[in-house]
Image: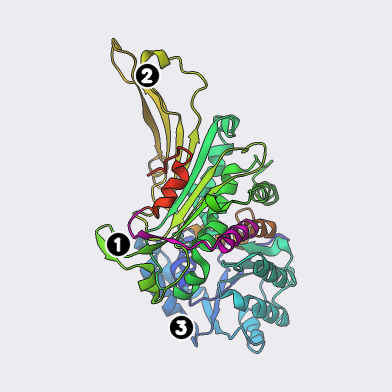
Amino acid sequence: MSFTADRLLLFGATGDLSQRMLLPSLCALDADELLDPDLRIIGTARSDLDDASFRNLAREALEKYLPAERRGGMANFLNRLSYQQLDATTLDGFSDLAAKVGEPNQGLAIFLSTAPSLFEPTIKGLQHAGLDGDHVRMCLEKPLGVDLASSCEINDAVAQAFPEDRIFRIDHYLGKETVQNLLALRFANILFEPIWNSNYIDHVQVTVAETVGLEGRVAFYDDAGALRDMVQNHMLQLVAMLAMEPPTSFDATAVRDEKVKVLRAMRKVTATETVTGQYRAGAISGEAVPGYDEELGKDSDTETFTAIKGHIDNWRWKGVPFYLRTGKRLPERVTEIVVQFRCVPHSIFAGMGATMEPNRLVIGIQPEENITLNLTAKVPGLGQDGIRLRPVPLNIAMPDAFVGQHRRIAYERLLLDLIEGDQTLFVRRDEVEAQWQWVDSIREIWNSTDQKPKTYTAGTWGPSAAIALAERDGVSWHE
Ligand code: BG6
């Protein structure tokens, strides 16, 4: 059912995500006059706050996390906020919550940013209080389970109250401009699609490197690890966008139908196709940082780094390795995709002493939003002792190409789509389950071969085995 929500109910409203991302995103949208004047935002959490103290908490969060130039109209935004305390584990408080939400004129969007253990009781409470009708949408924040079975349990619980066309599963990478731009790059240009296959592409690399460590998320991260925290969701979504067939339109069903086909075609990896690592004390940008075990306060077998050689078993990608790597405490924060093309089939310059490098497309997702295509050019000169060729970059710096646009928080786009009811950038149940299926198969391999993470020094690119994983195939990670 199509409607623009005029009530937004935030569960976990006092939490970290709400303070760092959700409230700032909503305030920024408001400053840009993208929110309906009638939209009311109701926060709920366990903390005993009233409307005024929630607005204070929100003001502090905005001052901390939203740049001053995007805070115009903050007073107006704060006036939209109200708060209702709730213990979601019992049904008792839900009627008061419903009274606080009131009767929306159009519809209600609910954002669940709580521990997954609260999903089920929360859904029951919402049903009990009548907050589940045709005019209600449900948005879920990760983690959605720890494996396929637990993810199915969550999905089943939510499905009892909400049909799939009113469930919005967040993967915040899909809210990033540069990730959406992958679709524009691939499907709005004639150049790439004809060569976007195993005939012309040698391999693909996807790197999501972070410099941060545990960031205080001790219990959560140690139960998750890099595979569940980053590969299961963000990295597989990047792979799906890179590898999918052209959808017939930019529409939620068409796009997600194509993504899920890729996710289902991911081949089970073998033991020699993955590497895991855990950081030890080291230095990042000249600053000493402790090891994972020190931050955690105990020994652990959780991986803070993983590298995987993946394959997509379909016609387009047969034989093209997708090298994925992600880790905490790496030397720099960078998310990038490298598409390495094959050599030309025959070099007319070979007899003239010229060596040439195959083309390479590097797509910077963050922090640099650059697209670089390496082309081969002739080095100027008379060429008496042969012709010399060299790769030269064709560079597009997105911020320079689009001057005057502000860099938005990924959640701005996603919250707006939730309010307006567009599911294109949200993850469908079959996608999440295909992602878990692949990730579970990797965990099974690790368990059955008793694979323990190798150590790496913080500030380096992971264990040396990760370099060997690519170099065995004659491939170097792009750095
Ligand atoms: C989250 C992970 O989903 O993504 C974090 O739980 C990670 O561990 C974060 O730091 C990275 O997001 P971004 O947008 O900073 O790349």
Q: Is residue 57 magenta?
A: no
Tell me the number on the disc at residue 199: none
User: Reading the chain from its start, which is encountered first: label 3 or label 2?
Assistant: 3
Please give the residue where the numbered disc 1 appears in the rendered image: 282
User: Reading the chain from its start, which is encountered first: label 1 or label 2?
Assistant: 1
Task: Name the residue type under label 3.
Answer: Ala
Tell me the number on the disc at residue 354: 2
Q: Give the residue at x 46% y 83%.
A: 52
* Circle 1 crowding by C-alpha within 10 Å: few under 14, some 14–19, many from 20: some
Residue lying at the far left in this picture: please name it.
Answer: 286
Task: Name the residue type under label 1.
Answer: Gly
Q: Residue 138 occupies which quadrant of the picture?
A: bottom right
Please give the residue where the numbered disc 3 appears in the rendered image: 52
The reply to whether dot 3 and dot 2 touch (C-beta < 8 Å) is no
Label 3 SS? helix
Label 2 within 8 A of ligand 1 by Cβ: no
* Circle 2 crowding by C-alpha within 10 Å: few under 14, some 14–19, many from 20: some
Give coordinates of residue 265: x percent, y percent: 66, 47
Q: Is residue 450 magenta?
A: yes
